[in-house]
Amino acid sequence: MKEFLLKTPDLGDTEKIELVRWLRKVGDSVSKGDEMIELVTDKAAFPVESPYSGILKKIIMEEGSVVKKGDILGIMDINE
């Protein structure tokens, strides 16, 4: 397995991005395309999908955290 850093995507021109909710727990198996995280800006809510299949290994940013583009949210072990 290979380690993958799950990062905040580019959500355009926004000042504040809040990590509202993790939709998976550490140890959960995840398929490519599964929704993992819910982010909210002042304009809309954005689900973050897993780009790979694997296992959520670690949560870095907790629910309620204010994040910015490129911040590491969690770590996955992926089957690549």
Image (cartoon, helix red, strand yellow):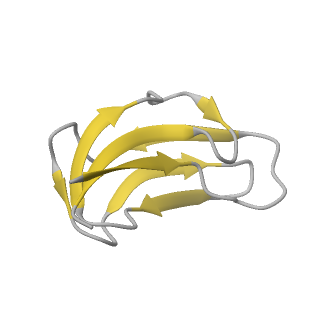
Quarter of the rendering containing residue 49: bottom left
Residue 31 vertical placement versus 72 (above, below): below
Q: Where is the C terminus found, in terms of image quarters?
A: bottom left
Residue 18, given in percent of the width and then of the height, sits at: 61, 38
The residue positioned farthest toward the bottom in the image shown = 33
Name the quadrant containing residue 75. top left
Q: Residue at x 84, y 57 (%)?
A: 13
Where 76 sits versus 58, above or below?
below
Where in the figure is residue 23, as x and y percent of width and height?
Answer: 31, 48
Provide residue 33's location: percent of width, then percent of height: 34, 72
Between 30 and 76, the residue placed more toward the observer is: 76
User: Is 51 above or below relative to 68?
Assistant: below
Q: Quadrant of the N terminus?
A: bottom left
Position of 49 with respect to 77 (left or right) is: right
Residue 67 in the image: state x and y as whole percent. 64, 36
Q: Is residue 50 left or right of residue 53?
A: right
Which of the two residues, 37 or 76, is positioned nearer the viewer here?
76
The image shows a total of numbered marks equal to 0
Q: Residue at x 73, y 56 (%)?
A: 43
Nearer the observer, 10 or 21: 10
User: Which residue is painted at 69% across and 47% down in the image?
Assistant: 69
Q: Is residue 72 left or right of residue 13?
A: left
- Residue that appears at 43% across and 29% down: 60
